[in-house]
Amino acid sequence: MISPIVTVPRAGPAPGASSLVEALEGGAVLMFPDLDFPFSPFEERFVERPFADGKAKNVNIRGAGAEIRGAAGTPEEREALRQLLIRYRTFAQDLIDRHLPAYTGKIALAGTSYRPFDVDRRKLSWRRDDTRLHVDAFPSNPIGEKRILRVFRNINPDGQPRHWRVGEDFGSMADRFLGRLPGYSPLSARLLAALRITKARRSEYDHLMLHLHDALKQDTAYQQSAPQADVRFAPGQTWVTFSDLVMHGAMGGRYMLEQTAYLPVESQADPRKSPQRILAAKLGRPLQ
Ligand SMILES: [Fe+2]
């Protein structure tokens, strides 16, 4: 089954419609067509040219101090961009509180990013090529028992959509790839942490997800022939998905805002729908 796109009007789903949390945990992308996130006249410049130093893929704020990294421009402009990202973080929290209230108080907001570059322009190695269908996994930042929820918004000023591919459901993908992955070594996981190559011990789940990410991106036949659908998110649209569960590739578009959030597996409405529990069920044992 290909991941569905569920359109959610500002007022929320119609009475009697199935819950948004259920759809989201089941692998849907929730698309909000008409939420407001206005720019001030000063901020319009941030979608006229990229205010990025070009060293990293995007500009972001992180942590309690919300320090900005990767930004370009005058001190005044960098501070205005930082304030814009802080406002977007609040917008994402408000969206969760209003439309996914079951997660309020359980979800932790992490980085907020401004993505001014066209996804097609940068020639990257296959591993970093996010036009290939993949699920998100972070090599140096083990996720363990957390889920990755992301809130995206297209802020392109010229009508250019954000073009995504979405792929088949996680379980069907895992059925094809799980048998090909190398076994997990607790010893090398401890070594990676001791050498500070990873920020924490890489769990078996993290190991499997990294190898799935790489196996998916390297398999050109799968990339071309796997079940998939094109989706175009228009400027002004906001979309929310578990990017560790939903197979996706970013094919085109520039100027986007993104908020990452972490949710403990145990805080899900149904933890069995997590990639952690799906993989454990397919292996027939708990993950190490
Ligand atoms: Fe991704």
Image (tube, rainbow, N blue to C red):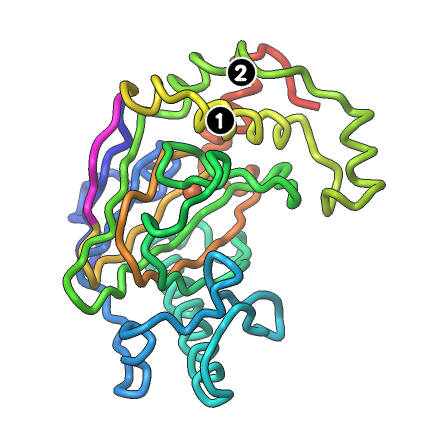
Circle 2: residue type: Ala
Task: Identify the element where label 1 is drawn.
Answer: helix
Quadrant in the picture for the C terminus = top right
Please rate how many residues cluster around mark 1, counting C-alpha atoms within 10 Å: few if below 14, some from 14 to 19, many from 20. Answer: some
Can you give x and y, in whole percent of width and height, for residue 73 in the image?
A: 45, 81
Residue bearing mark 2? 281
The boundaries of the magenta stretch are: 227-232
Q: Does the residue labelled 2 lie within 8 Å of ligand 1?
A: no
Answer with the quarter of the image where residue 131 lies: top left
The mark nearer the N terminus, 1 or 2, is: 1
> Closer to the camera: disc 1 or disc 2?
2
Mark sitting on residue 113? none
Viewer-proximal residue, 240 or 141? 141
Answer with the quarter of the image where residue 192 lies: top right
Q: Is residue 226 left or right of residue 65?
A: left
The answer to if 1 sits in the magenta stretch is: no
